[in-house]
Each structure stands twice: as C-alpha cells, then as structure tokens.
Image (spheres, grey):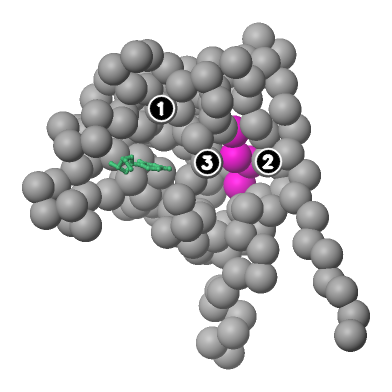
Amino acid sequence: MKEMILQTKVLVCPYGELTDTDREVVDAARAATANSYAIYSHFNVGAAVRLGSGIIVSGTNQENAAYPSGICAERTTLFWANSQYPNEPVETLAIAARTEQGELEVPIPPCGACRQVILETEKRFGRNIRIILYGARQCYIIEDGVKALLPLSFNADFLE
Ligand code: THU
C-alpha cells in the first residue's frame, strides 16, 4: 500500500508584519465584527474580501433562533460580494472574530461549509484565494488557496 501525504503550508506572523495591502482587508474583517448578529453564541465573526478591482467588501455571521438557519461571516461575505460584483474575482479573504472578552488571540479557521464555498469561488473565477486568518497574537496566511484547508475536496470536476 502506498501512502499519500497531503501537506498544508501556513505562514504565521504577527499582525504588525502583514503588508499594508493585507492589513487593509484584515482591518475590514476586524471592523465588521461590530456588525455581527450573534445573539445566541456571542461569537462575533467578521470577514472581508478584496476583489480584483481593489474593492473591499465585508460581512458578518447572522444567527437565527432556528440555529441552522444562521450563516457564517465567510459565506455572507462571499455571497454578497459575488452577488454585487459577479465579474470580479475574489483575491483575498480575511477572517476575524471577537467575543465579549475582545478579539481572539488565536486565528479562527473557516468551518467546513465555508471552505466548500471558498472552493466554489476559486473555481468560479479560476484562481486561488489568499486567505488571512487574524488573531491578536498571530495571523495565519494561506497562500495556496483553500485546497490547503480542504484537501481531497469535491468540486465540479467530478461532475463531468
Ligand atoms: N462562525 C462564523 O461566522 N465563521 C466561522 O468560521 C466559524 C463560526 C459563526 C457561526 C455562528 O454564528 C458562530 O460563529 C458560532 O459558531
């Protein structure tokens, strides 16, 4: 039997070492946490994307008393961006979160459903998305697209 090893490269750095361009989209995600509707979990998530033209669009998690009807910040943001700017590729996606105690020290990674939607967005525009996960202590940068976070992923290729 052969082994198949799937590797994930994650760059780790403090916020202060991000480039100005990355910091701008990260700051939009951090600011968006203030608009989160998270009255059940009190876990406020913000996401922001930089589109091909440089426009930055942000969104938040939106919870619901019927819990599964809520949606994560990443999907709110991607669906909103892709609805408003259907021809603009998503270049970068930044994610940040805060609780009542303040910003999270450690970056929060996107959930499985959001990873699948990020993958669809990459497929749609034919390019990888740079993903930046913000934490007050350190940030993670995934440069190689969501496949690093979603190895052996199901995508449209299998439907052909
Ligand atoms: N949440 C996000 O918005 N993004 C993530 O990556 C993880 C979780 C939201 C969903 C829910 O509103 C709250 O955080 C707690 O799970």
Label for residue 97? 1
Could you classify mark 1 by the number of other residues whose Cα lies within 10 Å: few (under 14), some (14-19), or many (20 or more)?
many
Asked whether residue 42 is drawn in magenta, I would say no
Q: Position of residue 138 (x, y in %)?
A: 63, 20
Q: CA distance from mark 2 to mark 1?
A: 18 Å
Q: Nearer the viewer, residue 38 or 128?
A: 38
Q: Residue at x 61, y 80 (%)?
A: 157
Q: Ligand 1 falls in which quarter?
A: top left
Label for residue 109? 3
Mark 1 and mark 3 lie on one chain; the one further toward the N terminus is 1
Note whether 1 is above or below 102 in the view shown: below
Q: Magenta stretch: give its range.
A: 127-132
Q: Residue at x 42, y 59 (%)?
A: 113
**Which residue position holds label 2?**
142
Foreground: disc 3 or disc 2: 3
Note whether 79 is above or below 131 in the view shown: below
Q: CA distance from mark 1 to mark 3?
A: 10 Å
Q: Is residue 33 left or right of residue 157?
A: left
Asked whether residue 130 is drawn in magenta, I would say yes
Mark 3 and mark 2 lie on one chain; the one further toward the N terminus is 3
Mark 2 and mark 1 lie on one chain; the one further toward the N terminus is 1
Q: Is residue 70 left or right of residue 154?
A: left
Q: Is residue 157 left or right of residue 108?
A: right
Split into 4 quadrants, where in the image is the C terminus?
bottom right
